[in-house]
C-alpha cells in the first residue's frame, strides 16, 4: 500500500504573523481532510504568531507549505521523498530531508495520517486525554526539527468498549458525548470500537414465531427520579427523571427502538469518520422475556431484574429452533446496522445448558478438537483455578462453554449469516470463552474467528493469572485481552489499575497478541490509564510509572508535581486492590449498595486501610494541583474532589455499619445517632460530586446514590427515630 503522507516545506526562521498554507486536493479522502484541519488547529495553538490556512494549491510568500495526502491523492509529493519508508497500513512516518527544510508526516492509510498528525502534536508537547487536550503552558516559535520517526504499532488492535449497562456508564451518554469521547480516543490512536449491548436495550427489533421484540429499556429497567428531595439535583437541570438525553421523554417501545437505532447508527458513523472500525457485541443466546413462549423449555436467566431467557435442558447444541432464533437476532443487527465491521458473540456469563456438555464435546472433537480432553478434565481445570469463576461456578461455566462453542461452530458454517447487504462479510469474534479452554482456542472457535478473552473481573486478578494468559495460542488466531480499567463490582468509587495494566500490556506484547479491549463504567480518573494504553501500544518497553511521570511532567512543566501524581496513582491503586481483595461488590451500583452494610458484623480492619489510601490519594492531588497552572489544573482538581467524595462515602458506610451494630445490641438511641451521621456523610458525598460533575456518568452516579443510598437510608432513619 502506498504510504499516505503530510509534507511540510518549512523555513528555518519565521517572522511575525507568518502564514502556513496547508495544501489539500479537493478530492482527498475525508479523513485526510480532517487531518489537514487538525494540523492547522494544532499549529495555531502551539506556535507564536502563526496563522494556518487550508488551501487547494501552494500560495506565494508562504512561511511554510504543507501538502496533505499521498502520492496517489497528491502526485506532487513523489519527488520530495523518493525513499519514503515502507510501512504497514498502520505505520506512521515523520521525516525531514537532508537540509532540514522539508518535512513529511503521514502513514500507510488515511487513518494513519490522522494519527501521524496527533503524534506530531504529542511530540510538540500536547497531551491527549479522554477528558480533553493539555497544551504546553507557553507558545513557542515555529519549528518541527527533532520530530523524525518511523513507528509501527506493537499491538494492532486497540479497542474501546462502549454503551455497556448501568446508569453510571456510557449507556447513559447521548451521541454528543460519545462523539467527543471517540474523537479523543482517535488522538490516542485507538482504532476499534465495540458496542456492548444487551437483549433488553432499545437498539434492535426482530420478530420470531409470531412474537415481536417489545422490550426497549435502559439499565435493567430501573427508574431514577431526580426531582423532589434529590440531593445534588442541580446537575440535572430541572429534569424529573435521569435519562439518556437521546431518549428523554420517550415512553413507548416503538419510540425508544427508533431512537435507539438513530443513537447507535450515529456512533457507528462517528467511528468510521475517525478511521475506526466498529462492531457490536451481543449475548447471542439470550433474549427478552417475550420470546420465552417461542422457545419451549427455556428458562429465565439469573441476572439483575431477570429480564432475559436462556437455553436450558430442552435445547442442545443441535437444536434447530434455537439456531433459527439466534440467526434471526444476528441478522436483525446486521440488517439494521449495515455498515458494521465486526460481530462479537459472547458466551453467557451464567450458562444454564451444561447438561449437554458430553454431546457438545463430541461435536467439537468431530471438528478437530484433540481427543485428550474430557468434560471431567476441563471441569477440574475450571474448578481448581484461582479466578472468581472457579469451584462449582467454574464447572458450570466450562460445561456451558463447551455446549455454546459446539452450537456456534455449527451455526456459523453458513457464511450468509455474516454477510452484509453490500456483499461484504463482517469479522466474527468470540468473546469470554472459559479460560479452561484457552490452550485449544484455535480448535474450538468457528473457522476464521478471532477471540476476545476475559480472564477475571479486575486487572489485578487478571495480572495474577499470567500462566493462564500464556496458554492462549496467539500465534494461531487473532487474540485480544479484556483490560478492566474500572470494575462495576468494585463500584462507583475512584479506581486505578496502572501497575496491573502495565504487567498485562507487557505480557500480551511479548506473547504476540493482536491487542486489547477496554472494560469500565465510570470514566472518572481513568485518563492516565487510557493514555498509557494508547502509548504502550506503540512503545515496546513503556512502563506504567514512566507513562504517568512523562504525562504529568510534560503537561504541568513540574517534575515534582509529576512525582506526587505517581504517588497518588499508587495510593489509588492500593485502595482499589483492598476493595478487590476483601469485598468485591463493595459499591456495586444496585439496590442495597449502602444498606447491605447495616448489620451487626464487626467493622473490617481493611476499611481503615482503604480510607487511609484514599486520604493519601486526595492529599497528593491537592498538593500537585496547587503547584501548577494550565490545562492540567482543572483535571487534577476534578480528581481531588472525587477523592473527597470517596472519603465521605466511606464515612457513610462506616456510620451505617455502626448503626447496625448498635441496633443489634438493642441501643436504638445510638443507632439513630449513627444513622444521622450516615445521612450527613451521604448528603455530603453526593454534593461533593455534584460540585464537579462533568458528564452523564457523574450524573448517573448521583442518581444511583439517591436511589440506592440516600432514600433507603432516610427511610430507615425515620423508622428508627419513630421507634426511639
Image (cartoon, rainbow, N blue to C red):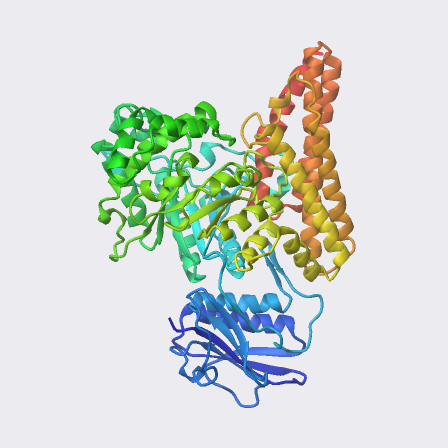
Q: Quadrant of the C terminus?
A: top right
Number of numbered discs present?
A: 0
**Image coords of residue 419 (percent x, y):** 26, 52
* Residue 254 occupies quadrant: top left
Residue 403 visible in rendering: yes
**Image coords of residue 411 (percent x, y):** 25, 40
* Residue 239 occupies quadrant: top right
* Residue 41 occupies quadrant: bottom right
Q: Residue at x 57, y 46 (%)?
A: 503
Judge whether 105 appears above or below 395 on screen: below
**Image coords of residue 444 (percent x, y):** 32, 40
Q: Nearer the viewer, residue 652 or 534?
A: 534
Give the residue at the far bottom of this rendering. 60
Q: Quadrant of the N terminus?
A: bottom left
Q: Residue at x 75, y 20 (%)?
A: 673
Q: Nearer the viewer, residue 206 or 414?
A: 414
**Side (left or right) of 78 relative to 543:** left
Residue 351 visible in rendering: no
Q: Nearer the viewer, residue 382 or 301?
A: 382
Q: Residue at x 43, y 30 (%)?
A: 381
Judge whether 689 appears above or below 711 on screen: below
**Side (left or right) of 43 relative to 137:** left
**Image coords of residue 292 (percent x, y):** 30, 27
Q: Residue at x 32, y 42 (%)?
A: 443
**Side (left or right) of 706 relative to 650:** left
**Side (left or right) of 229 relative to 199:** right
Amino acid at each position: 500500500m502506498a504510504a499516505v503522507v503530510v509534507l511540510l516545506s518549512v523555513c528555518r526562521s519565521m517572522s511575525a504573523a507568518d502564514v502556513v498554507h496547508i495544501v489539500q486536493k479537493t478530492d482527498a479522502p475525508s479523513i485526510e481532510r480532517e487531518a489537514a484541519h487538525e494540523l492547522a488547529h494544532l499549529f495555531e495553538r502551539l506556535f507564536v504568531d502563526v496563522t494556518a490556512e487550508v488551501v487547494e494549491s501552494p500560495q506565494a510568500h508562504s512561511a511554510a507549505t504543507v501538502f496533505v495526502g499521498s502520492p496517489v491523492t497528491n502526485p506532487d509529493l513523489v519527488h520530495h521523498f523518493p525513499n519514503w519508508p515502507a510501512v504497514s497500513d498502520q505505520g506512521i512516518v515523520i521525516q525531514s530531508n537532508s537540509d532540514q527544510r522539508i518535512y513529511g508526516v503521514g502513514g500507510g492509510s488515511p487513518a494513519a495520517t490522522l494519527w501521524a498528525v496527533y503524534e506530531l502534536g504529542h511530540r510538540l508537547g500536547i497531551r491527549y486525554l479522554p477528558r480533553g487536550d493539555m497544551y504546553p503552558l507557553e507558545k513557542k516559535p515555529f519549528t518541527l526539527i527533532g520530530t523524525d520517526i518511523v513507528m509501527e504499532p506493537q499491538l494492532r488492535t486497540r479497542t474501546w468498549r462502549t454503551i455497556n449497562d448501568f446508569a453510571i456508564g456510557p449507556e447513559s451518554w447521548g451521541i454528543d458525548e460519545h462523539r467527543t469521547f471517540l474523537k479523543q480516543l482517535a488522538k490516542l490512536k485507538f482504532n476499534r470500537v465495540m458496542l456492548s449491548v444487551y437483549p433488553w436495550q432499545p437498539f434492535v427489533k426482530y420478530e420470531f414465531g409470531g412474537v415481536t421484540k417489545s422490550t426497549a429499556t435502559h439499565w435493567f429497567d430501573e427508574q431514577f427520579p431526580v426531582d423532589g428531595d434529590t440531593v445534588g439535583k442541580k446537575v440535572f437541570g430541572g429534569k424529573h427523571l435521569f435519562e439518556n438525553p437521546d431518549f428523554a421523554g420517550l415512553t413507548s417501545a416503538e419510540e425508544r427502538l427508533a431512537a435507539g437505532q438513530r443513537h447507535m447508527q450515529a456512533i457507528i458513523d462517528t467511528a468510521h469518520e475517525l478511521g475506526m472500525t466498529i462492531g457490536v457485541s451481543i449475548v447471542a443466546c439470550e433474549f427478552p422475556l417475550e420470546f420465552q413462549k417461542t422457545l419451549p423449555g427455556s428458562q429465565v436467566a439469573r441476572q439483575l431484574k431477570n429480564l432475559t431467557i436462556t437455553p436450558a435442558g430442552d435445547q442442545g447444541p443441535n437444536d434447530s429452533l434455537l439456531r433459527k432464533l439466534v440467526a434471526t437476532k444476528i441478522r436483525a443487527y446486521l440488517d439494521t446496522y449495515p455498515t458494521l465491521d465486526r460481530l462479537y458473540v459472547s458466551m453467557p456469563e451464567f450458562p444454564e445448558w451444561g447438561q449437554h456438555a458430553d454431546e457438545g464435546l463430541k461435536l467439537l472433537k468431530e471438528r478437530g478438537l484433540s481427543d485428550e480432553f474430557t468434560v471431567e478434565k476441563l471441569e477440574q481445570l475450571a474448578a481448581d483455578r484461582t479466578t472468581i469463576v472457579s469451584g462449582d461456578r467454574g464447572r458450570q461455566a466450562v460445561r456451558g462453554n463447551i455446549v455454546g462453542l459446539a452450537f456456534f461452530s455449527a451455526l456459523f458454517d453458513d457464511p450468509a449469516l455474516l454477510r452484509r447487504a453490500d456483499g461484504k462479510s463482517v469479522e466474527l469474534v468470540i468473546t469470554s470463552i472459559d479460560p479452561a479452554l484457552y490452550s485449544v482456542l484455535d480448535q474450538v472457535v468457528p473457522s476464521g474467528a478471532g477471540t476476545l478473552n476475559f480472564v477475571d473481573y479486575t486487572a489485578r486478578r487478571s495480572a495474577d493469572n499470567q500462566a493462564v494468559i500464556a496458554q492462549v495460542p496467539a500465534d494461531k488466531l487473532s487474540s485480544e485481552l479484556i483490560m478492566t480499567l474500572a470494575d462495576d463490582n468494585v463500584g462507583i468509587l475512584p479506581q486505578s489499575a496502572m501497575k496491573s495494566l502495565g504487567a498485562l500490556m507487557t505480557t500480551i506484547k511479548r506473547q504476540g497478541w493482536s491487542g486489547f479491549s477496554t472494560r469500565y463504567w465510570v470514566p472518572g480518573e481513568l485518563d492516565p490509564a487510557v493514555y498509557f494504553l494508547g502509548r504502550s501500544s506503540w512503545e515496546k518497553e513503556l512502563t506504567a510509572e514512566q507513562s504517568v511521570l512523562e504525562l504529568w511532567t510534560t503537561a504541568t512543566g513540574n517534575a515534582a508535581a509529576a512525582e506526587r501524581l505517581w504517588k497518588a496513582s499508587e495510593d489509588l491503586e492500593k485502595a482499589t486492590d483492598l476493595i478487590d481483595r476483601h469485598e468485591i461488590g463493595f459499591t456495586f451500583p444496585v439496590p442495597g449498595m449502602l444498606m447491605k452494610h447495616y448489620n451487626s458484623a464487626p467493622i473490617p480492619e481493611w476499611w481503615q486501610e482503604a480510607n487511609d489510601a484514599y486520604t493519601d490519594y486526595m492529599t497528593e492531588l491537592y498538593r500537585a494541583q496547587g503547584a501548577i497552572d494550565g490545562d492540567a489544573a482543572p483535571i487534577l482538581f476534578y480528581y481531588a474532589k472525587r477523592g473527597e467524595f470517596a472519603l465521605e462515602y466511606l464515612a457513610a458506610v462506616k456510620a451505617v455499619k455502626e448503626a447496625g451494630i448498635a441496633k443489634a445490641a438493642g441501643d436504638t438511641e445510638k443507632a439513630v445517632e449513627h444513622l444521622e451521621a450516615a445521612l450527613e456523610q451521604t448528603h455530603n458525598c453526593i454534593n461533593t460530586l455534584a460540585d464537579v460533575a462533568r458528564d452523564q456518568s457523574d450524573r448517573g452516579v448521583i442518581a444511583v446514590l439517591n436511589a440506592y443510598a440516600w432514600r433507603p437510608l432516610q427511610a430507615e432513619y425515620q423508622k428508627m427515630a419513630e421507634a426511639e
